[in-house]
Amino acid sequence: MKYWQLPQAVEEVLPEQASAMEALRRDLLDLYRSWGYELVFPPLLEYSDSLLTGLGADLDLLTFKLTDQLTGRTLGIRADITPQVARIDAHSYLKEGVSRLCYAGTTLHTRPKSLMASRCPVQIGAELYGDNSPEADIEIIGLMIDTLREAGVGQMTIDIGHVGVYRAVFQALDLTDDPALFDALQRKSAPDLSVALQGRPEADAQTIRALMNLHGDRSVLNQARELLGDLAPNALDAIDEIDVVLDALEAEGDGIDWYVDLSELRGLNYHTGLVFAAYAKGVGRALANGGRYDDIGEIFGRARAATGFAADLKTLLAEGEALEFGLTAISAPADRSPELAKKIKELRSQGEVVITALNGEHDSRCDRELVMENTWVIRPLGTA
């Protein structure tokens, strides 16, 4: 039995799902192309000191590593494509002005990110470089929303925050990045937060507790202004930026609920501004997420404003409405006549699927067949 077993959280994709996944991949890349995003294919593995530099440092524990037999250096199998695209923009592509890049490819994780996650997600996404204005973030979030709609996701919630709020508060309170405090805030665990705040001035503790509760509808932004206006004025710019983005994205229409979370700390170690994630009703994990990560490319030779998002094709396929991929085909007799071969080639060039009936057996996907009636014609299967 051990020979057919797969590692935990590693799955194979069978024909029906694979066909639907490939159709979705093509549709999404065509969508990105229509927005002006250019396709890149980063390599599956790189030297780990390159792959785990910059924002890739957060992926260290998720990355499989091995020794290169040619050089003896350590290689890493990519756990996230975003750092590779940042390297391409900063070092390889070197386009002046705004650069829009998109990608799709398999990644590999040493462990699943969540209980139901795959260790080999098929990541698809888009990145925008060279513009630090809110309009760039608005474009990326709009493209993320269109991605979910293309995948068949109906009602969705977009969770939006800004790491500048957290950083401004901690700077104002002269607090260092305490891992226990960070973890409690990230999980919004009041008991753990109380433990992490022991020994700190009560006024500071009250501010941190209030920060943890700054999440909900858009009215949270005004609450934050009242709470932080005097204490951490640098946070106001971040709050205003969220307001600008929400004003612009309200035009996306029905089917979207906006949720503001000013204590959202996901990706804090490399995000520099707006952060966002998309959820669907009844799904406990994000279907897509992203944010701003300015100047990450500096280590590769060019610091650039950067924002983008990513999603897992497998998750989109599983959680979106079922994509209809009803493959129908034409059955052709196993006949070597040149006329039949010409007809089959013609049909295939028109996009039809033609399957030879070996041993006279029709493939189960066939609903039509080629029959000879002075010339080769198509008839419903079984009516000839």
Image (cartoon, helix red, strand yellow):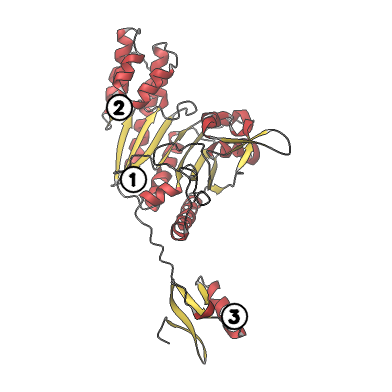
Residue 163: numbered disc:
none
Q: Secondary structure at mark 2?
A: helix
Residue 353 x/y as whole percent: 50, 71
Dividing the picture into quadrants, the one containing residue 289 is top left
Q: How many marks?
A: 3
Residue 232 x/y as whole percent: 37, 16
Residue drawn at (33%, 29%) of the image: 261
Instruction: Give the mark toward the camera: 1 or 3.
Output: 3
Residue 259 x/y as whole percent: 30, 35
Q: Amino acid at mark 2?
A: Leu
Is 168 in front, or is 204? 204
Q: Left or right: where does residue 362 sit relative to residue 204? A: right
Q: Amino acid at mark 1?
A: Glu
Residue 366 x/y as whole percent: 44, 74
Instruction: Give the mark toward the camera: 2 or 3.
Output: 3
Q: Quadrant of the C terminus?
A: bottom left
Is 101 in front, or is 332? 332
Q: Amino acid at mark 3?
A: Ala
Query: Counting residues from the N terminus, which is met first, the one under dot 2 or under dot 1?
Result: 2
Q: Left or right: where does residue 63 sit relative to residue 233? A: right
Badge 3 is on which residue? 341
Query: Counting residues from the N terminus, which is met first, the one under dot 1 or under dot 3?
Result: 1
Badge 2 is on which residue? 221
Q: Secondary structure at mark 1?
A: helix
Query: Counting residues from the N terminus, which is met first, the one under dot 2 or under dot 3?
Result: 2
For the residues labelled 2 and 1, say whether their Cβ atoms are less than 8 Å apart: no
Which residue extends farthest front? 1
Q: Is residue 292 visible?
A: yes
Residue 252: numbered disc:
1
Between marks 2 and 1, how big is the CA–CA gap? 20 Å
Q: Secondary structure at mark 3?
A: helix
